Image: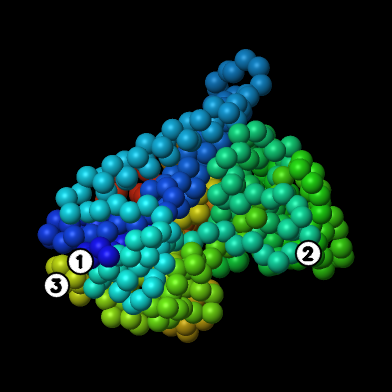
């Protein structure tokens, strides 16, 4: 048996940084990883997908070269082998960087293999049993595979297996019209595939406001993506290179045929093979580890960070989990999940930047509010780039003057939204931003202008 001060299971965004803080504090740490260092973000999430998005955008802009007065002789081609090689090189550098960092920590012992609890403070990896008074679970999640009739007999892709694809699908059928599915839909359309998106709910990205969903659907349709909403999948058939998806809609049944099938309908936590029941660690109905406001499970000394706790599904929320745990354990700083403001982005092009509440959430709360909306057609930076799709919305509390939320769909929105999020964290009135002088020409310069045009949200 190996005894340590702490055990960390999983090398996603929270794990390595926590290991660094613990070892810097003089603790001994067993760091367990079963496959690739870096977790979802590095291997098949943020880093590789955004590398692919960059290649797809380059192809898209090249096809529009004439709009900018630039001449390109001949059609724009996409070499998918080269696209994948570029992505793989970026991933390999990030992955090795994380691994080398962890292996170089004084007091950190790297253990490769599957971890499984055999007692509340003991974990088995292969033939070894490791023990510690503090154990941090950071095992992430994986794609959900739904029980669709026929799916088990049909070759399909997930966001993970898409990373191995080095050829161009003739027709990619995407099941799921939310964040992951739409990013892949647009990028592969720009690479040159025909793309159909099938979404069971009445609109895309249903957690967003209806006009945001409609604007996103318009952007995708404008690029030639076939979007089917309100479409329930009843069966899947096919073989390698040919799939058929049967759907049921309000207009009746239909069959969508394609060459490749991508499942993008959600994720599930990697908690089913950890032996959590042996340790007495509570999980919810979906398998997520139940944690309190400081990431503690119901078993003293055991914490859950990142996607496996169901309290966030992003790299930045996982990293923030690490910050909360480290602050409480090492800095005597009582940080909490409850202090976190919702913030994320949808990386279609143009992107959606979100923070705080949606308009629908504010309306349902019944609180008096003011709102301002600004079309990207009236943003100088967007006009200069000939990228005027989308709009921006900010909502504030009428009485406290604090910002309640923002939805920014447009060029650079994923960066601009942070100006609003920072003000929300400061709990400052919107007038601070309204009276600020921003640089011209930028997208951010219109935030103060928007706030001069607030009107009651009725």
Left or right placement of residue 355 versus residue 82 in this view: left
Residue denoted by label 3: 332
Q: Is residue 110 above or below residue 403?
A: above
Tell which tag, 3 or 2, sits nearer the viewer: 2
Tell me which residue sits at (14%, 68%) in the image. 331
Looking at the image, tell me whether mark 3 or mark 1 is earlier in sequence order: 1
Q: Nearer the viewer, residue 353 or 443?
A: 353
Residue denoted by label 2: 149
Q: Secondary structure at mark 3?
A: loop
Left or right placement of residue 330 versus residue 363 in this view: left
Indicate the quadrant where residue 121 lies. Answer: bottom left
Q: Residues under labels 3 and 2: Cα distance?
A: 53 Å
Q: Residue furthest bottom?
A: 366
Label 2 CA crowd tier, 10 Å (few <14, some 14–19, many 20+): few
Which mark is on residue 5? 1
Say whether marks 1 and 2 touch (CB < 8 Å): no
Say whether marks 3 and 1 touch (CB < 8 Å): no
Say whether marks 3 and 2 touch (CB < 8 Å): no
Q: Nearer the viewer, residue 417 or 77?
A: 77
Looking at the image, tell me whether mark 3 or mark 2 is earlier in sequence order: 2
């Amino acid at each position: 048996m190996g005894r340590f001060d702490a055990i960390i299971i999983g090398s996603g965004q929270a794990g390595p940084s926590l290991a660094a803080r613990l070892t810097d504090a003089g603790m001994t740490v067993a760091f367990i990883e079963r496959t690739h260092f870096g977790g979802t973000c590095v291997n098949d999430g943020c880093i590789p997908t955004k590398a692919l998005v960059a290649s797809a955008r380059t192809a898209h802009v090249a096809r529009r070269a004439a709009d900018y007065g630039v001449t390109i002789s001949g059609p724009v081609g996409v070499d998918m082998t080269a696209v994948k090689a570029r992505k793989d090189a970026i991933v390999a550098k990030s992955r090795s960087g994380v691994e080398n960092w962890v292996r170089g920590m004084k007091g950190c012992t790297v253990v490769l293999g599957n971890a499984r609890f055999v007692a509340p403070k003991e974990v088995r990896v292969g033939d070894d049993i490791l023990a510690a008074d503090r154990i941090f679970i950071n095992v992430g999640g994986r794609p959900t595979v739904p029980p669709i009739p026929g799916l088990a007999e049909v070759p399909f892709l997930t966001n993970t297996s898409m990373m191995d694809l080095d050829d161009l699908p003739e027709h990619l059928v995407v099941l799921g019209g939310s964040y992951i599915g739409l990013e892949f839909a647009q990028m592969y359309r720009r690479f040159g595939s025909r793309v159909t998106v099938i979404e069971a709910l009445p609109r895309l990205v249903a957690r967003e406001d209806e006009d945001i969903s409609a604007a996103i659907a318009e952007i995708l349709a404008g690029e030639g993506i076939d979007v089917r909403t309100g479409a329930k999948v009843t069966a899947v058939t096919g073989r390698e290179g040919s799939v058929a998806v049967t759907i049921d809609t309000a207009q009746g049944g239909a069959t969508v045929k394609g060459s490749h099938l991508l499942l993008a309908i959600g994720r599930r936590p990697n908690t089913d093979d950890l032996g959590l029941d042996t340790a007495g660690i509570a999980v919810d109905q979906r398998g997520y580890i139940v944690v309190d406001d400081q990431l503690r499970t119901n078993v003293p000394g055991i914490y859950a960070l990142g996607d496996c706790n169901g309290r966030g599904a992003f790299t930045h929320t996982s990293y923030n989990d690490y910050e909360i745990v480290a602050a409480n354990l090492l800095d005597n700083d009582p940080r909490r999940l409850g202090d976190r403001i919702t913030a994320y982005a949808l990386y279609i092009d143009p992107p959606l930047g979100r923070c705080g509440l949606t308009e629908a959430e504010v309306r349902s709360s019944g609180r008096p509010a003011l709102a301002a909306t600004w079309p990207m057609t009236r943003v100088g930076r967007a006009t200069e780039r000939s990228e005027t799709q989308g709009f921006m919305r900010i909502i504030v509390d009428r009485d406290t003057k604090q910002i309640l939320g923002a939805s920014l769909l447009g060029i650079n929105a994923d960066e601009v939204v942070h100006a609003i999020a920072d003000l929300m964290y400061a709990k400052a009135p919107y007038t601070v931003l309204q009276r600020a002088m921003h640089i011209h020409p930028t997208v951010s310069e219109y935030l103060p202008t928007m706030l001069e045009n607030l009107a009651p949200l009725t």
